[in-house]
Amino acid sequence: MLPTGVLVQPLTPYIDARGSFLELFRKEWRLPIEPVQWNAVTSNAKVLRGVHVHIRHDDYLSVPLGRASVGLRDLRRGSPTEGLACVLELSGETPAAVAIPHGVAHGFFFHEFSLHIYAVSRYWDHADELACRWDDPALEIPWPTQTAQLSARDAAAQSLTELLAELSPSQPL
């Protein structure tokens, strides 16, 4: 089960002797996001990015190279899946993309060197990039690891309790 509004879009690679071609986004798929910015990020093995949550923007992402465990936790007050935590696997071997609505906390653990490409529905804004500790037991995300390499910002992130207090004035999201 995924949080309400999280959508997984299967992707079809076209492979020949030269390599592959993969459509990541088509407007006709009618996904719950209208991208205004696309980003490409590489991560080394055992890197964890997050856990982050946005008040205003939605994400759409794929891992066309490598493998990632995407941890999700629905922080939207009143959502039918409020409090639901889960892990979704994305990899280049089984191409898919995931749309993550604002209010759903998310983090990415990369099992190997990986490339993830993501789009956002609003331009990047530091004020819309809230965070909490990825390993806070209250988060209840069943990560496939106990250790990870983090950015300095993510390593110093607040607890889930503190994040929920910070989100409270914006609820319901």
Image (cartoon, helix red, strand yellow):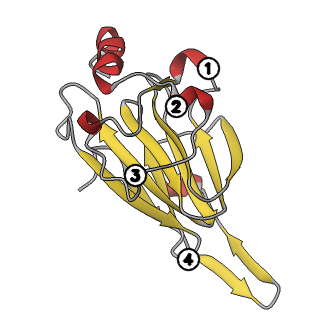
The secondary structure type at the circle numbered 1 is loop
Which of marks 4 and 1 precedes in the sequence? 4
Judged from this view, the residue extending furthest toward the right is 18
Name the mark on residue 146: 3
Is residue 160 toward the left or the right of residue 1 in the image?
right
* Residue at (31, 40) in percent of width and height: 73
Is residue 135 toward the left or the right of residue 120 in the image?
left
Which of marks 2 and 4 precedes in the sequence? 4
* CB atoms of marks 4 and 2 within 8 Å: no
In the image, residue 118 above or below residue 165: below
Which one is nearer the viewer's eye here, 67 or 144? 144
* Residue at (41, 21) in percent of width and height: 158
- Neighbor class of circle 2 (other Cα within 10 Å; few <14, some 14-19, many 20+) is some
- Callout 3, which amino acid? Gln
Q: CA distance from mark 3 to mark 1?
A: 30 Å
In the image, residue 76 above or below residue 110: above
Name the mark on residue 155: 2
Using the rendered view, name the quadrant where residue 123 is placed.
Answer: top right
Using the rendered view, name the quadrant where residue 3 is placed.
Answer: top left
Name the mark on residue 125: 1
Is residue 130 toward the left or the right of residue 65 in the image?
left
Residue 8 x %, y %: 41, 58
* CB atoms of marks 3 and 2 within 8 Å: no
Which is more foreground, mark 4 or mark 2? 2
Q: CA distance from mark 4 to mark 2?
A: 30 Å
Q: Is residue 167 visible?
A: yes
Q: CA distance from mark 1 to mark 2?
A: 20 Å
Name the mark on residue 93: 4
Q: CA distance from mark 4 to mark 3?
A: 25 Å
* Residue at (54, 68) in percent of width and height: 91
Which quadrant is the C terminus positioned in? Answer: top left
